[in-house]
Amino acid sequence: MKIRIVFFILSSICFLGFSQDRPNILWITFEDTSPQFVGCYGNKDARTPVMDKLAETGIRFNNAFSTGTVCSPSRSTLITGVRTFEMGTGNHRSSYPIPDFIHGFPYYLRQAGYYTSNNYKTDYNVKNAKDFTEAAWDENSDKAGWWKREQDQPFFAVFNFMDSHQSRTMTFSYESYEKLVIDKLPETNKIGEQDFSMPPIYRDSPEMRKQFARVYNSIALTDVNIGKLLKRLEDDGLRDDTIIFCFADHGEGMPRGKTNGINYGYQVPFIAWFPEKYKHLSPSKTSGAVTNEMICFEDLAPTMLAIAGVSIPKHMKGRVFATNNHSKAAPYLELSSDRSDNGIDMTRSVTDGTYIYSRNYMPFMPELRYIRYMEIGDIKQQMRNDLKNGKLNGLQSGLFEPRLAETLYNTKTDPWETENLANKPELQKVLKRFRKALDKKILSSKDVMFLPEYEIDIISKTTTPYQFRLDANNYPIAKIYKIAALSGKRGKAIAEKQIKALKSENKIIRYWAITGLKSQNKTLLKPHKAAILDAINDSYAPVSVTASAIAYDSFQNSHAEQKLKSYCKANNEYLALMALNHLLYVPNKTPFIATITELAKNDKLPYNLKAASLDILGSLNLVPNDFAHHKKLTPNIKN
């Protein structure tokens, strides 16, 4: 007994002594913000003095990227250090299992004696989220902070600021925005409707300026509140012992930004600040440094562990960008964008910090696709009205058209991504390099998101998507990708390959064959009508859904129409969501109005199905496209 007491005392002494030498780490995360709207990134119209000052005495990262384009997939990688396309967590607000050995990285800090707190958004996109969260944090609440730790205990504290969230910048009513943002913002920090330059991707009009000012003011309020937090840190005498990271969770919460697999959806402002005491851990020993070194959210977990002197688990593949173990940046970063709420999509991107290449595997949907939480925003409806009334230029109206399979933008000379360079003869070598880098990453990581969500849901009942993808017999990614890589490409030769692949014994190959045919010109599909009609009866339901959508849209087939109606009402929500997404983009929705109206009235319908149903009815002006109506019908909506 005496030995145990002595051991405990010695352990405690060692723990306290060691903890005092370790840095505190403060994460300041804020919502839905692109660097174009922060002062220190060159925007003279922005009112962000706190972040600007932090950058002036810290390090500003010019090439920091979220690994996703919407909250929960981005935060899934942030908390685990593992890519969503490895874990199967790429679809927004999904709930699939991950292996037991993958924890939130604060779990490892906590095991090493750190006090960990989160205030308070989680959105980690994993099954058993409650247990996962409790293992990571000593406290997770809107009251959490460093102030509840033991004396001299080092802390890792996260504060999530909601003021710049899409709800404030575009989705909530203007009256709500005034209450949540304008009424709380000091007069000197407010930005008027004529006080900023309008990005060229949006029409410059009084109506649009009124809405777009919301972005600037919401970020300005975020900056004010960050200042209050930093003052508390200072008042508590902790600034000189605390390393600070300040960044957004993904790109701007505006049409074409958030949810979209381009630079505007991925790139984030990212500032790091190291006190003099811990400058030796900093990637730069100079205050006010600006670095073009690329980092992404996969890198944050291992870097935090390295800063704290904690061993990095082998499943974390990101690089350490601080401390003496700072590793060299890779020449490319690979990024991903999948389903957001009710809007299905799949895009994979590669950037080298100058160019960004994106590969759209479902380009039959536009950049400004139907996602109800976007659609009910006043600015989105203004854009649709301007489109209807012929007030948009070619660039702006093109955002409502089907996408190309590939885009290539120079983000340094064209920050708003207005000119697709993919067809430029002088850039074909660059394009081929990016294609090769993307192919290599997809195959080496065994990107599990090439499974339809219907399939991910099925396999998650017996295993994890992470482990499933590692079995080549279950998941022959090379064979699947050979056909998936055709999706979005157009032409007779491609269509013939896809038709041939419809006969594959592998159901996922058949799925990608029919998905690719959805992007083909209707004229090219006519010789293959019989094969497409046969596919309606495919034994694999996702093939049948998409074949039905093609047959209805291209051939006005009555059997396909009935099958689509049946799938819209399917008990399986992923099949129903596929059918509804396809219906959103067919010209003639009239035969489906009764079915969709019935769905929209079903109070027990999962949110994504109700949202997709309302999008269809809203596109026909059969329900209002505003937040008040949406909130009434979907009271459990999350921010």
Image (cartoon, rainbow, N blue to C red):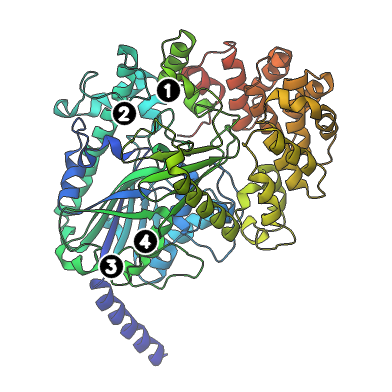
337 and 534: which is toward the camera: 534
Percent position (x, y) of residue 557? Answer: 81, 20
Which mark, residue 215? 2
The residue indicated by pointer 1 is: 395
Kind of residue at badge 4: Ala
Separation of disc 3 and disc 2 at Cα? 38 Å
Q: Which of disc 2 and disc 1 is earlier in sequence? A: 2
Would residue 549 be found to the left or right of residue 166 on screen?
A: right
x 55%, y 34%: residue: 341
Separation of disc 4 and disc 3 at Cα? 33 Å
Which quadrant of the rendered structure holds the C terminus?
top left
Q: In the rendered image of this protein, does residue 336 appear above or below residue 188?
A: below
Kind of residue at badge 3: Gln
Q: What element carries label 3?
A: loop
**Callout 2–callout 4 Cβ contact below 8 Å:** no
Separation of disc 1 and disc 2 at Cα? 21 Å
How crowded is the residue under tag 3: few (<14 C-alpha within 10 Å), some, or many (20+)? many
255 and 313: which is toward the camera: 255
Which quadrant of the rendered structure holds the N terminus?
bottom left
Q: Which of disc 1 and disc 3 is earlier in sequence? A: 3
Kind of residue at badge 2: Val
Kind of residue at badge 1: Leu
The residue indicated by pointer 3 is: 153
Q: What element carries label 1?
A: helix
Q: In the rendered image of this protein, does residue 166 appear above or below residue 307?
A: above
Quadrant of residue 493 within the rendered picture = top right
Q: Is residue 288 visible?
A: yes
Would residue 282 be found to the left or right of residue 296 on screen?
A: left
Q: Is mark 4 on a helix, strand or loop?
A: loop
Q: Which of disc 4 and disc 2 is earlier in sequence? A: 2
475 and 486: which is toward the camera: 486
